[in-house]
Image: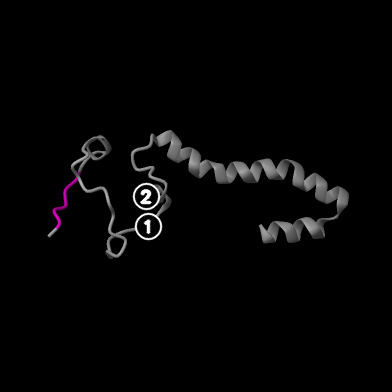
Amino acid sequence: MTAWFNCTAEEWCENEDWNHKIDWDSRFSLQNWIEQLGAACAPRSAIGALGSSYFLGWVVSLLFVSRLADKYGRRDFFLGGMVV
């Protein structure tokens, strides 16, 4: 039987005696990137940067892809974007 209790992030990360392994077969687990990347004890800014990098990629690509599409034709860039 597993004991469930609330704890803070500091308690979770500092206590090496606790079992930090998540049972993915349990109906209560949610498999996500935080566990896969080992970011459970990472600073909040690092986790925020992970989520923001997706949108940063959109912004950076929109700065030059739209101009190239106007210059060389939209069809190839559209198909390339769909593949990516």
Q: Which residue is mark 2?
A: 35
SS class, disc 2: helix
Image: 53 above or below 27: above
Say whether marks 1 and 2 touch (CB < 8 Å). Answer: yes
Q: Does the magenta stretch mainly form a helix, a strand or a loop?
A: loop
**Residue at 33% across / 38% down in the picture?**
41
Q: 10 Å neighbourhood of mark 1: few (<14), some, or many (≥20)? A: few
SS class, disc 1: loop
Quarter containing the C terminus: bottom right
Tally of numbered discs: 2
Is 32 contained in the magenta span? Answer: no
Image: 38 above or below 81: above
* Amino acid tagged 2: Glu
Instruction: Estimate the x, y position of residue 48 in percent, counting from the top left.
Output: 46, 39
Residue 2 numbered mark, or none = none
**Residue at 64% across / 46% down in the picture?**
58
Instruction: Estimate the x, y position of residue 6 in percent, counting from the top left.
Output: 19, 45
Specify the color scheme: one colour
**Residue at 73% across / 58% down in the picture?**
80
Image: 82 above or below 36: below
Distance in Å between CA atoms under marks 1 and 2: 7 Å
Q: Is residue 35 left or right of residue 3?
A: right
Quarter-wise, where is residue 8 in the image? top left
Q: Is residue 18 left or right of residue 71?
A: left
Q: Is residue 14 left or right of residue 72?
A: left
Q: Which residues are magenta?
A: 2-6
Is 5 contained in the magenta span? Answer: yes
Instruction: Estimate the x, y position of residue 69 in percent, counting from the top left.
Output: 81, 51
Front one among 81 and 67: 81
Q: Which residue is mark 1?
A: 31
